[in-house]
Amino acid sequence: MTQTASPVRRGGTTGRRQKGPSFLMALPAVLFFGVFALIPLAGVVVLSFMSWDGLGSPSFVGLDNWFRILERDHTHNALWLTFVFVTVSFIFQAPVALLLGVFMAGAQKYRAFLSVLFFLPLLFSSVAVGLTFQALFSPNYGISTALPFDWLPAQWLGNPDIALYVVIFVVGWCFVPFHSLLYQAGVRQIPASLYEAATIDGAGRVRQFFSITLPQLRYTAITSSTLMLVGSLTYFDLVFVLTQGGPGSATRILPLDMYITGFRNFDMGGASVIAVILVAVGLTLSLALNKISGSSRMESDKAGMG
Amino acid sequence: MSTETVKTPERAAEKVVTPAGRPTPNRRKARKPTERPNVLAGISGWLWLAVIILPIYFIVITAFRDRSDLAQSNPLVPSTEPTLGNFVRVIENDFFHFFLNSVIVTLATVAVVLAVSLMASYYIVRSVSAGGQRLFSVILLGIAIPVQATIIPVYYLIRQLGLYDTLWALILPQIAFAIPLSVLIIVNFVRDIPAELFESMRMDGAGEWKILWNLVVPMSIPALMTVGIYQALQVWNGFLFPLILTQSRDVRVLPLSLWEYQGQFAIDVPATLAAVVLSAVPLLVAYILGRRYIVAGLTAGFGK
């Protein structure tokens, strides 16, 4: 760190030794990031030991919030729901996005046409998507009244047994298009010669998919999976608009639990405890994924040299 | 460059030859059309289209339906007497005002994010001290921080700064949270600029700003496009910050206005959906005009 401070660089006129740009270049980013991201990150830990209703001034209460929140049924429920939400979302989104990406990268005309339309969900904000599906799943004027199938449930978002899965489907509808674009771009970078060689060797379509496409997409898969997993861990917007955590607490995942605890029940200290848990889980998850990706990248480097 | 490369696996992946940034649809690489058609894939593709289109079709036809018509008719059959009344009600309820707020917040945020992230990336890549690498590590940490989790201290901070319920309350924190991913994407491109180019510009007596403007900017266009489009979408669609940091009608942005319309129009579902449709129109226009650039730009920077 000493080097950064010592040379005073004004317009690079004080001698030709220093070659790098001055720290002033990075200063605005550092300021923004420090004030509105790093300080709040520390602040959330501090607030988890404080009592605050959101308006007055916070006061120190020690571990009270932690005990209260960790013993609460809502928290256990939210932790479990979050686990289900993240896992099932991933199991649904990742394969669909991968297959769609491969599909969209195909040369056929109709695929190019379909790809144009597959993008459409990205034009809608989460709130817009939420309101759309709320109407579509309405028991009074929604899809269940339109189609003559008895097995369609009248209640989708109102049924606590299926609400979480309906929400997961809608989240997938919203985010699969972006991830399939990532995979499409990944597939387009695979050298055609690999497929030509495989075809000459008599490898079929399925074989080529598993032996060429899939391994070649591993960096894309890591990028996409990280965004998917960490993203759904903290996902708030759509769930809030669709169900507000209900019915009962059937879809009250951690971020919603945090919002309701903090901004509905005015228990900011308790909400901060939940926030710290979220940060901890999020960090662990991304570090773990980073480790996996790091090791697989080294493997690939070696493979490249061999 | 510094030697502690192990910590940042991202850089190892940079070496792929061409960034897919240029919007040249290169379909020749794909398989030859001579092979037998993949029927299963075709059917699945059209099925997914149905999944994508059905909700959109539903909101569009409902937005043109009269309120009284809603409960009586089949929701998937277009109304026989379509009306523009719903759109009129939405527009009369300050739609364009909320739209303008969204435009201001999005443009301001993205412009600042692009500028400060580019400058920081230049510093990180070209810094001769260890500071660049350290800064990069800290900023990478920011990618792993879930934004939602810091909303309570951000709320506290914004109140303390006297910015609560202003557009600043939306712009400033969103700049901060957009920086990590933006820097990561841009750094990946700036790294690929050959060191000799920097050297020769310096020999010619170019200062930092000139190098930034005449070398770094042109060489990182795909990254800047990705950052611009991706972050603009994020901010344009963002809901949590407006929900928590603003209150009054004056500073309401589009996503929040949709949410408020729903409360305000309560049983007026067609009007709510008309607002939803209207809110997507600007992006639809952008998509129609610049589809190639948007699709390529959205992913180019992520291209490993």
Image (spheres, grey):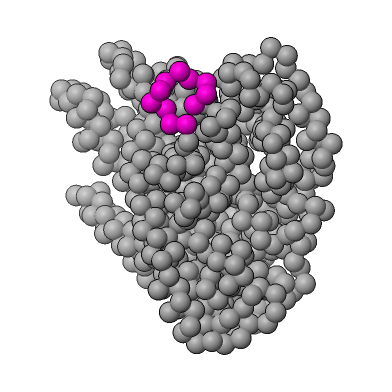
Q: In front here: B18 or A43?
A: A43
A195 left or right, relative to B164: left
Residue at 66% across, 56% down: B243
Query: Do we see residue B294 in this rendering?
Result: no
Residue at 55% across, 33% down: A138
Q: In front here: A123 or A92?
A: A92
B34 left or right, relative to B129: left
Q: In front here: A194 or B226?
A: B226
Residue A136 image point, x, y percent: 55, 31
Vertical arrangement, residue A231 with respect to residue A60, above or below: above
Q: Is residue A153 magenta?
A: yes
Q: Magenta region, mostly helix, strand or loop?
A: loop
Furthest toward the left, the residue is A201
Quadrant of the snapshot with the N terminus of chain B: bottom left
The boundaries of the magenta stretch are A144-154
Vertical arrangement, residue A273 with respect to residue A246, above or below: below
Residue at 49% across, 42% down: A158
Residue B5 image point, x, y percent: 37, 66
Residue B262 image point, x, y percent: 68, 42
Residue at 57% across, 30% down: A140
Q: Quadrant of residue B297?
A: top right
Query: Do we see residue A243 in this rendering?
Result: yes
